[in-house]
Amino acid sequence: MRFSVFSHSFGYLAHAAGVTLALSLAGIALGFVIGMAVCVARLSGKPWPERLGAAYVSVFRGVPLLVLLLFIYYFLATVGLDVPALVAAIGGLSLSSGAYQAEILRGALNAVPRGQGEAAVALGYGAVDRWRRILLPQAVRISVPPLINEFILLIKASSLVSVVGIAELTRVSMNIASMTYRPLEAYLAGGFFYLVINLTLAGLGSLAERRLARGA
Amino acid sequence: MTVPMIAMRAVGKSFGAHQVLRGVDLDVAPSEVVCLIGPSGSGKSTLLRCVNFLEPYDEGEVRIAGELIGYDLDSEGERRPMAPSRLRAMRREIGMVFQHFNLWPHMTALENVSEPLRRVRGLPKGEATDRAAAMLRRVGLADKAGAHPLRLSGGQQQRVAIARALAMQPRLMLFDEPTSALDPELVGEVLEVMRALAAEGMTMLIVTHEMGFAAHVASRIAFIDGGRILESGPPRRVFHESAEPRVRQFLQTYHDRNAF
Amino acid sequence: MDWDVLIRYAPSLGRGFLVTIACWASGCALGLALGFAVALAAGARSLALRAVLRVYVEILRGTPFLMQLFILYAGGPAVGLRLSATEAGILGLGLYSSAYFSEIFRAGFAAVPRGQVEAAMSVGMAPWDILARVRLPNALVAATPPIVNTLIVMSKETVVLSIITVPELMYQMQTMAAETFTAFDAIFAMAVFYWCLVEVVSRLGRRVEQRATAFLASRA
Ligand SMILES: Nc1ncnc2c1ncn2[C@@H]1O[C@H](COP(=O)(O)OP(=O)(O)O)[C@@H](O)[C@H]1O
Ligand SMILES: [Mg+2]
């Protein structure tokens, strides 16, 4: 084990970790928009939007992310776009995450006790107020811990965008491995950065969960 | 005089700083039926669970047919935990029926009864099944042998649970509010089984809120409050002649609640 | 879509598919066994043992599968661990999934109602019998849906093995694409194929779930 690999590569890896975080943030944010739309479609009560929403979830959860990334990458290349790597990376992450987030949001809405909506109806709330004041605020709270968990999964998944050549944490670890001929040290160092990020997030997640359990 | 089936002497039990049982003395003679009544949180379940050591007591003694349960005494009279295998051997002789039945949901009614016979009594499969079937017949559930617990009513589940305990041929039976989780119309079928059992001479210690049943079946009523047994005696005396204000208050509340 | 190419490469794709299935099955079998052992050991009294297992699970769940594969395959030789790509892939999948499976089993054991165990204790059952006859079957029921789910997730993770050159389906497909310049068609076929595979496996999984939990359906 040569520890100088760790100290020399720290700067590169820290920077690459920033890229990983930025990619994942973009993916989770765009994925949230997609997920919301898909969730609304699935709960709309109208047959076509419901079917489309279900198909979206089925396809983007069924196709492995690596396949999805390469598909977008080659597709963009075939139609002659010039920045395929970054677009493929963010597109792949957000399309895939959108499917998972749609399910998280749907689960959260279903977890709001039925009686609450009924109580609002009984009190004379209109549909908009019922959603805005009663159902959504609760659903969002319920979905915070699973969304943080989804963010962790996405950060790990983002290591796959290394295959389209983006200099994020995994790619940079690979470069360090091949430059130093010290793959074990390089990958352990890279893995350490992932671990720190994810454990921090997991800590935030359980904090949010405890807050939630305490209610109010 | 005969050795009591259950003899509790100065039994104390705490959960952390919270003392739940304080100096409990209670005897149950062979073939006696003792009903334990008292307000919620008074320590009834804890007392019952000390009898088969599901809850380790920390002071005093609990003896089953003369034998100390849960602890061994060494030559200096110091207590140390009993060998697990001996504790299990003692528990085999003590049947327990729980408020929430605690049937094993992945086994049929018949398997719930035959399982302990096979694992604990070591009976061969055929014999265990035969004995289990006979037990189910005895509690009126011969036709439900193949049903899984969650497909049975609460009353039926509780009768299976009684059959499971009885099949082990225990020397005494403990019941912890066996009818409290049941819909009112299902209470009777369970009490009927218990009444028959009492008539056959089974030794029973029963936590219950069924005062009518207690008045008719119990040889003795014990009233517990705040972890102490405040009154103990024949049903007539406890129900109608008690001088203990807590007992009268408890019974008054009970009457008010059930009057209509 | 160029069907001639697909037909020409059918044998190697078929072999790749078999490798995919083999890696998936053996990796998950390893993961289930390891995960079960970890969950059982996590119930031990020893604080040190529990801490070590916690660290094991957190590391495996906190880092990308691809990183773990690199550490095993590329980093292994530095500590005398020389594995073929396929061996590293199977071991990696086993370790990675074991973290998830152990958490599932742990939650399954925790979900067994206390009263069930007490009922077994009250008739004098021995700890081993209580584990085998009461705790385990109950835990498995609670664990079946998430286990099925994790098996599906892992079936998708197998494509990552192509990156360390395990000759599974994705790898064979990329080889074909490189040799015949049909990248887009190839990847499109892969997408459709995995989508179908996951759909089929999910449906089978739901059936298994229903079987395993049938007795929990309460009275109609
Ligand atoms: N496992 C436990 N840990 C802490 N406190 C307990 C536990 N079991 C019971 N208690 C407390 O002991 C008291 C007596 O409980 P219990 O014997 O169940 O009462 P009862 O059966 O008469 O309603 C209650 O205050 C209860 O909260
Ligand atoms: Mg109680």
Image: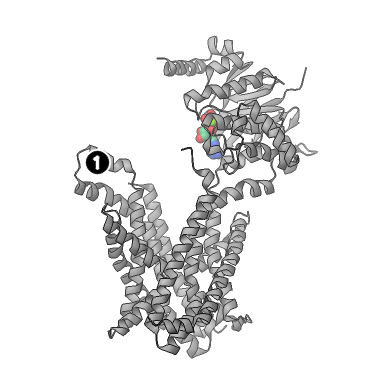
Q: Position of residue C209 (x, y in %)?
A: 51, 53
Q: Is residue A77 left or right of residue B85?
A: left
Residue C220 in view of the camera: yes
Residue A158 in view of the camera: no
Is label 1 within 8 A of ligand 1 (CB to nearest ligand atom)?
no
Check disc 1 and report its element: helix, strand or loop.
helix
Q: Position of residue A5 (x, y in %)?
A: 50, 85
Q: Quadrant of the C terminus of chain B?
A: top left
Q: Which residue is mark 1?
A: A120
Q: At x 48% / y 37%, what residue is drawn?
A: C219
Residue B8, compared with residue A73, is above or below; it is above
Q: At x 57% / y 72%, what residue is drawn?
A: C22
Q: Nearer the viewer, residue C206 or A181?
A: C206
Colour setting: one colour
Q: At x 51% / y 85%, what residue is drawn?
A: A4
Q: Position of residue C17 (x, y in %)?
A: 52, 75
Amino acid type, residue under disc 1 in the picture = Ala
Parent chain of label 1:
A
Residue C58, compared with residue C160, is above or below; it is above
Q: Nearer the viewer, residue B9 or A107?
A: A107
Residue C76, compared with residue B209, is above or below; it is below
Q: Position of residue A65 (x, y in %)?
A: 41, 72
Residue B1, compared with residue B97, is above or below; it is above
Q: At x 37% / y 51%, what residue is drawn?
A: A212
